[in-house]
Image (cartoon, rainbow, N blue to C red):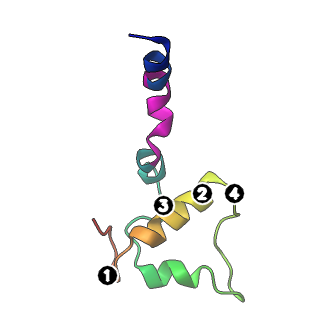
Amino acid sequence: MDKIDRLLLKALPRLNINKRLEENNPYLGKPCMELLELLDGDNYQAPEMKTLEWDQFMYAIVHASSEGGLIE
């Protein structure tokens, strides 16, 4: 095994972004409309941008169904 292969194997846990975004995500399972309402200008309650919580929030919106839960 050469040096590049060892570096890739070492980096793989950090590259598994989906697992990181799904773990302890408080927004998963909520309906899409409920998540979008958090972005409403007058009642803005979404997390700060450029944080892990923001990434989890956006991941939940992208994968939410209209009834709640994840779309596969």
For the residue carrying disc 2, how many other residues have a C-alpha within 10 Å: few (<14), some (14-19), or many (20+)? Answer: some
Q: Where, quadrant-wise, is the C terminus in this rendering?
A: bottom left
Q: Is residue 46 left or right of residue 3?
A: right
At 43% from the left and 41% from the top, the residue drawn is 16
Rendered view: 59 above or below 42: above
Q: Which residue is mark 4?
A: 50
**Looking at the picture, how far across and down is residue 5, in whole percent?**
43, 19
**Looking at the picture, how far across and down is residue 11, in whole percent?**
50, 28
Q: Where, quadrant-wise, is the N terminus in this rendering?
A: top left
* Element under disc 1: loop
Mark 3–mark 2 Cα distance, whole angstroms, equals 9 Å
Q: Is residue 61 left or right of residue 48?
A: left
Q: Amino acid at mark 3?
A: Pro
Look at the numbered discs 3 and 1 and tell me whether their residues touch, using CB distance below 8 Å.
no
Q: Which residue is mark 2?
A: 53
**Looking at the picture, how far across and down is residue 26, in whole percent?**
48, 61
Q: Which residues are drawn in magenta?
A: 9-17
For the residue carrying disc 3, how many other residues have a C-alpha within 10 Å: few (<14), some (14-19), or many (20+)? Answer: few
Q: Amino acid at mark 4?
A: Lys
